[in-house]
Image (cartoon, helix red, strand yellow):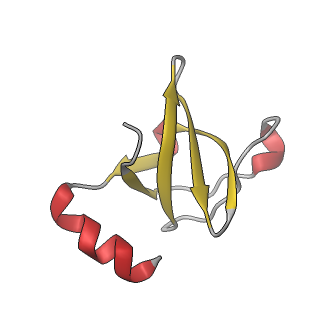
Amino acid sequence: MSGSYCRSLYPFSGDQHPQGLSFHAGDMIEVLQAAPGGWWRGQREGSSGWFPSSYVQVLEVRDISYVLLVI
């Protein structure tokens, strides 16, 4: 899962989790680590932290070129 990209489906406040990553719906996130229990570590806009995997959709390989343009 590391090195994958995902798009957030819902907003998430990183304040809800120690070392959490905040984002808005539609944001692109690079996945750095997937932990048991459904929490992933990712980064966006220079910040990194943990977020629930159920809040995002993993992008297909064909979508990566779009992600690179957005980031």
Q: Nearer the viewer, residue 3 or 20?
A: 3
**Image-based side of 39 in relation to 26, left or right:** right
Q: Nearer the viewer, residue 20 or 11?
A: 20
Give how far across and how far down residue 27 sits, in percent.
52, 67
Residue lying at 76% horizontally and 48% vertically, measured from the top left = 14
Q: Please tell me in which quadrant of the rendered image residue 67 appears.
A: bottom left
Give how far across and how far down residue 44 sits, in percent.
59, 63
Residue lying at 16% horizontally and 64% vertically, measured from the top left = 62
Residue lying at 64% horizontally and 61% vertically, measured from the top left = 23
Q: Nearer the viewer, residue 52 or 36?
A: 36
Give how far across and how far down residue 7 sits, in percent.
42, 59
Q: Residue furthest left?
A: 62
Q: Please give the count of numbered marks on the rendered protein.
A: 0
**Image-based side of 62 in relation to 66, left or right:** left
Q: Residue furthest top?
A: 36
Placement of 47 over or under 2, stated as above or below? below
Q: Please tell me in which quadrant of the rendered image residue 16 appears.
A: top right
**Image-based side of 38 in relation to 1, left or right:** right
Q: Residue furthest bottom?
A: 69
Give how far across and how far down residue 66 sits, in percent.
29, 76
Q: Quadrant of the N terminus?
A: top left
